[in-house]
Image: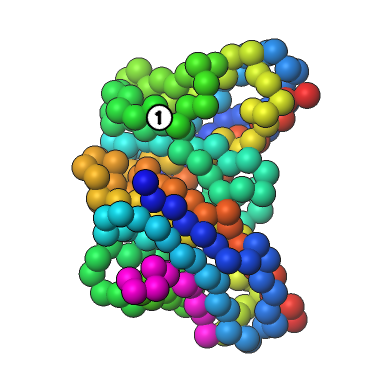
Amino acid sequence: AQSVTQLGSHVSVSEGALVLLRCNYSSSVPPYLFWYVQYPNQGLQLLLKYTSAATLVKGINGFEAEFKKSETSFHLTKPSAHMSDAAEYFCAVTINAGGTSYGKLTFGQGTILTVHP
Amino acid sequence: GAGVSQSPRYKVAKRGQDVALRCDPISGHVSLFWYQQALGQGPEFLTYFQNEAQLDKSGLPSDRFFAERPEGSVSTLKIQRTQQEDSAVYLCASSLRESNSPLHFGNGTRLTVT
C-alpha cells in the first residue's frame, strides 16, 4: 500500500516570497505522484504530475516539484507567491497498476496556503 | 466543453434518510471515480467504473453505500439510512481513458446529515 504525508497543515508566506509545500510518500513500487490545488467550494485541479520521466516537473501557474527517491519526497515550490495562490494543496500518490493507474489516488491531508500582501 | 457536473451542490438529510448524488462526467470519458472528502481531510477513494462496469469498490465504507453507472455515462452514488459520519463532500472525477489519463474533478456535493 502507498501513503502520503504532508508536513504542515498551514503555510503562510508573504506575496513575492518562496512557496515550499512538503510531501513525503511511501510506496513499495515506483510511484506516480501528483499535486492538486483546491479553491474554496471547488473540485481539485491538477497542478503537475511525476510519472517516472524527468525528476523535476513543471506545472501550471509557475509551480514545480522535484522527485527525490532517496528522500521519498516530492516537494512543491514556486519562486514568488501571488495572492491568487491562496488555496489548499494536496499531494497524491498512485502506482502503475493496470487500468486504475492515475485514478485510484491516495491523498495527503492537505496544506492550506495563505498569502499575505 | 462542459466539465464534470455534480448535483445537487448541497444536500441536507436527516439521519436515516436515503440520498442519491448524481455525476455527469465529461462526454466520452471512459473512467469515473467517486471520492469522499471529510472536513479538513484529503479525498478518499470510494469506487471506480470503467464504462458501465464497477471494477473497484474497495473504498465504499459500508453496505449502505451503492454506486451505479448503468449506461456508462451518468453515475449515481446512493447512501441508504444516512448517518452523521456520512457528512462530507462527495467528489466525482472522470478521465478519458482506462489508464494514463489525468482526472477531471467536479465541484462536489456537500452532504450534511443532521
Give the side of residue B99 with respect to residue A112, left or right: left
Q: Position of residue A51 (x, y in %)?
A: 28, 62
Element assignment for label 1: loop
Report crowding for label 1: few under 14, some 14 to 19, many 20 or more residues within 10 A (C-alpha): few
Residue at x 50%, y 41% (from the top left corner) = B44
On screen, A17 above or below B30? below
On screen, A47 above or below A29? below
**Magenta span includes A77:** yes
Chain to which mark 1 belongs = B
Q: Position of residue A25 (x, y in %)?
A: 42, 61
Quadrant the C terminus of chain B occupies: top right
Q: Which residue is mark 1?
A: B58
Residue A99 lies in quadrant? top left
Whether residue A9 is visible, yes or no, is: yes
Q: How many marks?
A: 1
Residue at x 55%, y 71% (from the top left corner) = A21
Q: Position of residue A102 (x, y in %)?
A: 32, 49
Whether residue A57 is visible, yes or no, is: no
Residue at x 68%, y 79% (from the top left corner) = A13
The span shown in magenta is A69-79
Residue at x 41%, y 36% (from the top left corner) = B33
Residue B58 lies in quadrant? top left
On screen, B36 above or below A94? above
Q: Nearer the viewer, residue B2 or B7?
A: B7
Q: Position of residue B67 (x, y in %)?
A: 45, 21
